[in-house]
Amino acid sequence: MIKLKKMKHFDCKYYLNTDVFKGICKRDKNKINADDSACNNFEKAQKCKYCSNFTLTDSELGTCMTKYDAYPEMNAITCNDFK
């Protein structure tokens, strides 16, 4: 089970960013702050940092399958190798 206290809106698959600090919830269309704690409808977004092929090499950079540079926050929705 995901601990909602540590997860933020920007980690949710329903979060749609409108700028750096805020966005819209795709479920209910409410405006939300990116850094606020996740709600009860939270579902983890498919991001590189959650993939087993991703290795963090720096605080803001990593590698995918030890071949490609990748950002931890990068969406991996279209990645065929996401695990």
Image: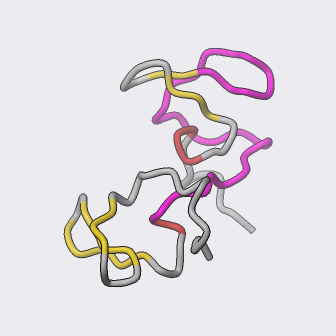
In-front residue for pair 51/3 = 51
Toward the viewer: 4 or 18? 18
Q: Residue at x 40, y 82 (%)?
A: 65
Examine the structure image and report whether residue 42 is included in the region drawn in magenta.
Answer: yes
Most frequent secondary structure within the magenta stretch: loop
Q: Does residue 28 appear to the left or right of 58 in the view shown?
A: right
- Indicate the position of residue 61 as horizontal and vertical percent values: 25, 63
Q: In the rendering, at what x and y percent does residue 52 appear?
A: 52, 81
- Horizontal and vertical percent position of residue 24: 62, 21
Q: Foreground: 21 or 57? A: 57
Residue 23 is situated, as x and y percent measured from the top left of the image, at 54, 22
Color scheme of the displayed model = secondary structure
- What segment is highlighted magenta in the picture? 24-48
Looking at this view, name the residue that lies furthest to the bottom.
66
Farthest left residue in view: 58
Question: Looking at the rendering, which quadrant does residue 76 occupy?
Answer: bottom right
Determine whether 9 is above or below 50 in the image. Answer: above
Q: Quadrant of the C terminus?
A: bottom right
* Residue at left offset 32%, top offset 84%: 66
Residue sitting at x 79%, y 28%: 27
In the rendered structure, the answer to whether residue 34 lies left or right of residue 24 reads left
Of residues 3 and 70, the one drawn nearer to the viewer in this rendering: 70
Q: Residue at x 57, y 62 (%)?
A: 79
Q: In the picture, residue 60 is in which quadrant?
A: bottom left
- Whether residue 43 is in magenta: the answer is yes
